[in-house]
Image (cartoon, helix red, strand yellow):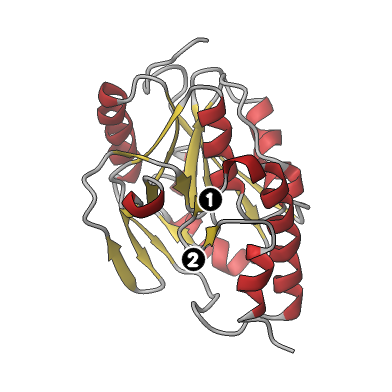
């Protein structure tokens, strides 16, 4: 197994799935580190899954570089890229098999699990007490990065849900490490929290959840930033609480 420095190759490049040009322009494209092409960004419209976009970008990324997946409704503040790279360097000093890094997630399992990260989510500052960097057992999909060259890819069967935690579990299965780093950003999702969701979204999450549960059944329970999956069917039961009829 080859391990790379956080500063190997071309540094950072970015990939996103886009569905709304206004949101993309107002948030992600307004980020100073992406303005005027300062860092490469590939935006994919009408992708069938996060994997379709990410894996396509991954195929052309240089070995050792970090490919950052980020939602179109994320705003990266001034200096974010330098802060993220500094966070990777600090993490590498503690976790030499580092291959995946995110800005928000879950550290630990079971009773010891705790939230980690510092993000502004829909106007609500989530500044968790866990010291950063810390090992991640789950990452939120809003932003995470994978270092090219470790054989990690997103799973198209997961659609647009659970794919960040999936890549963390893939890394663990390969003896690689994942972390949450200190790299504050803003997430301006239009999806409200804890309220009813449309049937079409519920159906999408159910399908992804069933695929995730089947794939990692022998590794359950898995705690994510929005639910704990202890046994097959948990995602379906959770979503049923919020689905509009």
Which sits earlier in the primary sequence, circle 2 or circle 1? 2
Front residue of this view, candidates 184 and 169? 169
Name, please, the residue furthest toward the bottom: 245
> Disc 2 vs disc 1: which is toward the camera?
1
Name above or below for residue 150 compared with residue 146: above
With 203 as the anchor, is 160 left or right in this view?
left
Name above or below for residue 148 compared with residue 240: above
Which residue does the image show at 48% across and 44% down from the upper left?
Answer: 144
Which residue does the image show at 35% across and 51% down from the upper left?
Answer: 113
Front residue of this view, candidates 102 and 229? 229
State the SS at label 1.
Answer: loop
Numbered tag placed on residue 179 in the rendering: none
The answer for how far apart the CA atoms under marks 2 and 1 are is 38 Å
- Quadrant of residue 96 in the image? top left
Front residue of this view, candidates 173 and 96? 173
Residue position for label 1:
221
With 201 as the anchor, is 84 left or right in this view?
left
Front residue of this view, candidates 107 and 193? 107
Which residue does the image show at 51% across and 33% down from the upper left?
Answer: 146
- Image coordinates of residue 58 in percent, x first then y, are 63, 30
For the residue carrying disc 2, how many other residues have a C-alpha within 10 Å: few (<14), some (14-19), or many (20+)?
Answer: some
Residue position for label 2:
26
For the residue carrying disc 1, how many other residues have a C-alpha within 10 Å: few (<14), some (14-19), or many (20+)?
Answer: some
With 118 as the anchor, is 19 left or right in this view?
right
Residue 140 seen by the camera: yes
- Quadrant of residue 239 in the image? bottom right
- Image coordinates of residue 211 in percent, x first then y, are 74, 51
Residue 40 seen by the camera: no
């Amino acid at each position: 197994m080859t391990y790379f420095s956080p500063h190997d190759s071309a540094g950072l490049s970015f990939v996103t799935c886009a569905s709304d040009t206004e949101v993309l322009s107002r948030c992600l494209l307004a980020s100073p580190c992406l303005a005027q092409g300062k860092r490469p960004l590939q935006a994919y419209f009408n992708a069938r899954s996060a994997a379709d976009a990410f894996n396509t970008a991954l195929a052309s990324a240089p070995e050792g570089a970090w490919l950052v997946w980020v939602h179109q409704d994320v705003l990266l503040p001034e200096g974010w890229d330098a802060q993220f790279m500094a966070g990777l360097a600090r993490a590498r000093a503690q976790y030499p098999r580092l291959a995946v890094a995110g800005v928000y997630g879950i550290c630990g399992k079971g009773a010891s699990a705790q939230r980690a990260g510092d993000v502004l989510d829909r106007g609500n500052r989530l500044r968790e007490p866990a010291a950063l960097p810390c090992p991640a057992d789950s990452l939120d999909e809003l932003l995470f990065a994978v270092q090219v060259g470790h054989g990690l890819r997103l799973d198209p069967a997961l659609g647009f849900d659970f794919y960040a935690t999936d890549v963390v579990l893939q890394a663990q299965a390969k003896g690689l490490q994942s972390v949450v780093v200190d790299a504050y950003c803003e997430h301006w999702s239009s999806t409200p929290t804890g309220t009813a969701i449309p049937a079409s979204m519920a159906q999408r999450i159910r399908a992804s959840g069933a695929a995730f549960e089947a794939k990692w059944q022998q590794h359950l329970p898995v705690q994510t930033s929005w639910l704990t999956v202890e046994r097959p069917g948990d995602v379906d039961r959770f979503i049923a609480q919020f689905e509009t009829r």
